[in-house]
Each structure stands twice: as structure tokens, then as C-alpha cells.
Amino acid sequence: MESITVKSSKRNELIDINHEVEDIVSKSGIKEGICNIYAPHATCGIIINENYDPNICLDIVDLLKEYVPQGKWRHDRIDNNADAHIKAAIVGPSETIPISKGRLVMGRWQSIMLADFDGPRERKIVVNIIKS
């Protein structure tokens, strides 16, 4: 198990962490297995989607901001980030990807991304490689 540190610069942001995860998989020496990427935070999550066209990431952020607006939830009375908690719950905290021949099994356009909904912050992301 290893971790990576990711810094967001906006309140709502998708950050590509694919290369960092691929490096961990490569260094592990495991040829067949699974890779789990987990965000141990309540206001961010992990997604897999296209990142070649940056508009996809912006569209995802815009959709979530539209459907889960800031400032109208009961939890906002505590620390004004209820929308971030709800978005993170929708996205989910983790993704699991097969490893074959020492590489992540992913589609051509897929990337692993941290979805931060309460930035800017520094986040620790846990990467666990399990040999099969």
C-alpha cells in the first residue's frame, strides 16, 4: 500500500492522477492482480473517465454543481460544505482496476481522477495493489 499527495487549486476540480497510480503499479512488480485507489476523505472521491478532452471534466463538475448547489443544505449550518459531502457520496471514494501483464487494464481514453469538491486542499490518496 502506498499513497500519493494531490493538491487541488479550486473548490470543485477533477485532477488526473493516472500517471502516479501507473508508477505505483509498475514499481510494485505485480503482473496480475487488482489496484484499488481510495480517497479517505468525506468531501472528495475517485472517478474514471475521459481526460483527453478537458471539457469532459468541466462538464462533470458543472453538472454536479448544478444538481447539488452550495448553500441550501442543513449541514451548511456547521461548515458550509454540505454540497461537497453530497457530491463525494454520489461519485464514491474508490475505484478498482484490474492489472494484467504489469499494467492497468483501462480503455484508451480513460484516466483515474481525484474529484475534489471542497478545495483548494491537499489530499492523501491511498493506492493498494493486490496480487492475484
Image (cartoon, rainbow, N blue to C red):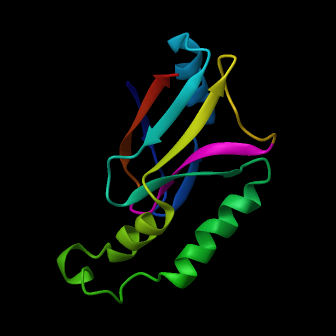
Q: Is residue 11 visible?
A: yes
Is 7 on the left-hand or right-hand side of 35?
Answer: left
115 in magenta: yes
Q: Exactly how many numbered labels are in the figure?
A: 0
Q: 101 above or below 118?
A: above
Q: 27 above or below 73?
A: above
Residue at 55 percent of width and 14 percent of height: 30
Residue 74 location, x and y as percent? 25, 87
Q: Nearer the viewer, residue 121 or 99?
A: 99
Residue 93 location, x and y as percent? 42, 53
Q: 79 above or below 34?
A: below
The quarter of the picture where the N terminus appears is top left
Q: Nearer the viewer, residue 120 or 67?
A: 67
Residue at 56 percent of width and 21 percent of height: 25
131 in magenta: no
Is 70 on the left-hand or right-hand side of 61?
Answer: left
